[in-house]
Image: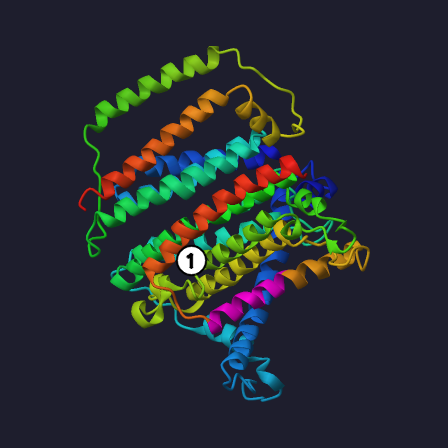
Amino acid sequence: MIDVAFWFVVILTLGSALIVVLNEKLVYSAIALLFTLFGVASLYVFLWADFLAGAQVVIYVGGILVLIIFGIMLTNRITSVNISHTSVQKGMGGVAVLGIIIVLGIMILNTPWYQTEFVEPAQTTATIGTLLMMEYLLPFEVASLLLLAALIGAAMLSRSGE
Amino acid sequence: MTVDNLINWFPFGTEWPVLTFVTAVIICALPVFLFIAVYALVAIYAELKISSFMQDKVGPMGQGVGLHAWKFGILQPVADALKLILKEDIIPDLADKKLFVMAPFIVFVGAFISFAALPFGQNIIIADMNIGIFYILAVGSLSVIGIILAGWSSNNKWSLYGGMRSAAQIISYEIPAGLSIISIVMLTGTLSMQGIIEFQSGTIWGVLPNWIIFNNPFSFIAFFIFFISGVAECNRTPFDIPEAESELVAGAFTEYSGMRYAFFFLSEYAEMFVISAIAVTAFLGGWNSPISGFMNSSGWGVFWFMLKSLSLIFLMIWFRWTLPRLRVDQLMSICWKVFLPFSLVNIFGVGIWSLLVG
């Protein structure tokens, strides 16, 4: 049963990821990315990482993807629907992809994966919260400081004309 | 009632896994779809009637497709729905056809899948997830993408402006709404919708219901920030600048007609319900009765939940017909200069409050 859902999600993710890369219209790539990101979020759900899946959707779909689409829409004249990105050197690219697939495949097959038993963890968010606030407090605060600096920097840049 | 329970319950579950899965999903999805459709009809009728009462004009009086059988224009929403279904589906020549066709469905799916985590009653919830309220806030971002797509693919300036304004508005107002919810999560210590409601059973000093809105002064403010931001996220008046008909025709939906327009329409009403339902769950006690111990069984839970949600929807309709539209700059400055600082103070205040009092 879970297999059915799993393979559906896998096909959705990989199929839309292929569209992202191969489609020549930039907007279509962005929209296909929506399905890829949702697929990845669903894969997190299969790993019982529900909070991570939610965060993936909030940050990537609600934030980054919207930003990408905004970027595409704002940098184009409204009448030109044909914004395209063409691929060059497909042969060489194919060889490189094949090489990466082989290396990754060998690595995946030879890694001793850590396996947990198939039970739903009692709580996911509470553990993440405790870890963030106790063990990883410093990296957490450093990351938030970095984001704050980026925020102020963005505001500065957009106001530079005044 | 969850998808998992249904799957386990099916007798042919092990032999036909695909069939079982698809059937279980359909069994869960179909009532939600029917609910949205029926509720939208009621809401459209209410919108027409309430607007007429508020503006002292004559609302729909008799409508009967040649029958004139029903009073008070009760068949008006049915006629509207029939009209939308039968209308010609027009796709502009210069539109990006694939995206144009896809956009209404993305918007509708964004509103539709939120219903999976709405607690209609003690036992009536499709999936009581650990991260329920976070899930609803997360999938809401789908609608933004749908609306941008609708605006862009229509390939005209009104749609594009409408789509951009709408996206900017929804993204901005998601922040105060999300921060208000965070202050609630800090109080209850759970993201599960049922968990948040269970936190609110009982009374304060034996008089007030133990709802989060009455829990402390900060959560009282958080409710209003959340609800107003929610109205803004639905793009309804006074925040309907994305589809301001006097300047943008109909915003992102300008080129849409027939069923495709109906889907946008449905999702607007569905989103209104979702926002109201979250507000009811997070602040107004969900399916808990307002008077402790009075009509508090699981059957009445549905009644209370619907009553509270529909009251909030009435409030939204009230807003729409009494308040003028905000300008873009006012809209953004309210969000970023008023709501955002207030909700940040709220988070801090709730933290201090739960340390000192709770």
Q: Secondary structure at mark 1?
A: helix
Q: Residue furthest front?
A: B356
Q: Locate residue B198, reporting x and y percent.
A: 72, 45
Q: Amino acid at mark 1?
A: Pro
Residue found 57% across the figure and 28% down from its top: A129
Magenta segment range?
B309-322
Residue B293: name its quadrant. Answer: bottom right
Residue B329: name its quadrant. Answer: bottom left
User: Does A19 appear in magenta?
Assistant: no
Q: Locate residue B189, reporting x and y percent.
A: 64, 37
Q: Which residue is mark 1?
A: B104
Q: Tell me: residue B116, above or below residue A100.
A: below
10 Å neighbourhood of mark 1: few (<14), some, or many (≥20)?
Answer: many
Residue found 72% across the figure and 39% down from its top: B8
User: Does B320 appear in magenta?
Assistant: yes
Residue B86 seen in the current view: yes
Give the overall secondary structure of the magenta segment: helix
Q: Locate residue B167, reporting x and y percent.
A: 37, 53
Residue A146 vs residue A36, the one in the foreground: A146
Q: Is residue B218 left or right of residue B287?
A: left
